[in-house]
Amino acid sequence: MSFQMKKMHKKYWLSFSIFLVLLIIGKPGWSQKYSISLTIPDAADSVIYLAHHFNGQIFVDDTVRLDLQGKGAFQGDSLLDQGLYLIYLNKDHFNDFLLGSDQQFEIKHRFLKPEECTIKGALDGELFNSYKSFLSDLKKRQQKLLNKQKEVQQNKDSLKQINAELDELNQKVTGFWFSEAKKYPDLFYSKFLLSSYIPTLKETDIPENRMKNDSLRWVYEYNFRKDHYWDYLDISDERFLRTPVLKPRLESYFDKVLIQQPDSVIPYSIETIEKAKTNTKSFRYITTFLLNHFAQSQVMGMDAAFVKIAEKYYLSGQANWADSATIASIGRQVVFKRNNLLGMKAKELKMESWDGPYFSLHETKTEYTVLVFWEPDCGHCKKQIPELYNDVYLPLKDKSISFFAVNSQSKKEEWENFINEHKLYNWIHVWDPHDLNNFRINFDVQTTPIIYILDKDKKIIAKKIDPQTVKKMLEHLISGKPL
């Protein structure tokens, strides 16, 4: 397992400085410290890092050089934020431990014999260390079963028995989580163990009337998955920010569990953010995570989720951690995206054609309109525009499809030469040299080419796609199938 060691960005530390000052002011006359004593004989005279998990990466909190006996200590004048931490020598030698409220304790460890690690003086750490030993034993048994599984692939009875034993091991782990949570209900250790548990629906729990209909059953199972996904992971608990648990769970929920359509994703994005709102740090992280997640999404239409989160939290002032430059940048992207979301009616374009007459986008009377913004000296356009013409327009020219092609530049001669050179005839070729239509903002034309598909009412049904995708989608639509 490889980790990239990184120093926390100064802005990240700065974001917590006010919180720490308030904490000290709120408790005058005393301060709590952390002191983690280390004994690691096989790392004598080596630098050891104390680090924590955050957002899929590892960040350094402290360092110490051990003496010739392998002894040393991490010490600080204020408590560390709780979470999953590491003592780290290098990418091949490190050890996770759970840091709770007890932060004066000792760790005895051997990197070459990690099973001999002991922790004393911190209950969360001690229990988690025991849990790791429990898991290690089960993993050995699991590996033996998996090896046997490969040997008996043709023997159904043996295979069934091995699968039953593997299921039993999984049930032991789950049983351990709940047993420990019952014993230690107030410890972060218990919450951390249970955070890995996602309820599953048994067939016996599905109502009989739903079982008889595949569609009804699917809806029931889908609702169960999305409604119970967070049952055992408290996203408002900031301690999970410093674990490897939260980020992949968020990614899985919004990329796999939920239906990948804006109408499904947006309300659950807002619901998730609102759940985290009781804790300032969790609220900040999840809001930022989801904004970036949807800004970078490759799923068509997810820019609607970006716009919603940006408007509700950033542009409204709720995201008070964002500086003016960040707000301005987000606001600019919202301006470019909010008028061209899937399902919206495309803004009207009334433009002059390359041979004189004016054309209106809204007055094109075909079942579908391919709206493309391009320019003759754009590298991608030089490849994709002829491809759009030859591979999409020509094979479908007898169908009820208009091609409304907007030259985004003001150089007429180069534009006309390109049209003639590639024989791009029978398209509606238009331009707007004085930017009277505000098309760059209304259609998010920050790069070219940009291709949209509109229905007969000029509603946007696809956007920012390549010629081959245009062809597949048009063929699908022409056949009468919904996208």
Image (spheres, helix red, strand yellow):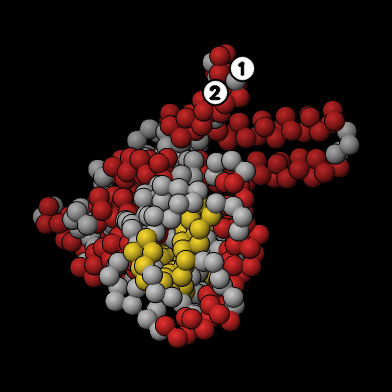
The answer for how far apart the CA atoms under marks 2 and 1 are is 8 Å
Q: Residue furthest right?
A: 154
Q: Disc number at residue 212? A: 1
Residue identifier under label 2: 216
Question: Given the image, on which type of amino acid does mark 1 rest?
Answer: Lys
Which residue occupies 73% across, 45% down? 143
In the image: residue 310, left or right of residue 99: left
The answer, for residue 430, to whether it is visible in the render is yes
Tag 2 and tag 1, C-beta contact below 8 Å = yes
Which residue occupies 51% across, 28% down? 219
Q: Disc number at residue 424? A: none
The answer, for residue 69, to whether it is visible in the render is no
Q: How crowded is mark 2: few (under 14 residues within 10 Å), some or many (20 or more)?
A: some
Examine the image and state in which quarter residue 15 appears: bottom left
Compare residues 378 and 123 and report the one nearer the observer.
378
Which residue occupies 13% across, 52% down? 27
* The C terminus lies in quadrant: top right
Question: Given the image, on which type of amino acid does mark 2 rest?
Answer: Leu
Examine the image and state in which quarter residue 426 appears: bottom right
Q: Residues within 10 Å of mark 1 (few under 14, many from 20)?
A: few
In the image: residue 86, left or right of residue 23: right
Q: Where is residue 440 in the image (x, y as percent from the top left)?
A: 34, 68
Compare residues 211 and 368 and report the one nearer the observer.
368
Examine the image and state in which quarter residue 201 appears: top right
Q: Where is residue 278 in the image (x, y as percent from the top left)?
A: 24, 43
* The N terminus lies in quadrant: bottom right
Compare residues 187 and 12 and report the one nearer the observer.
12
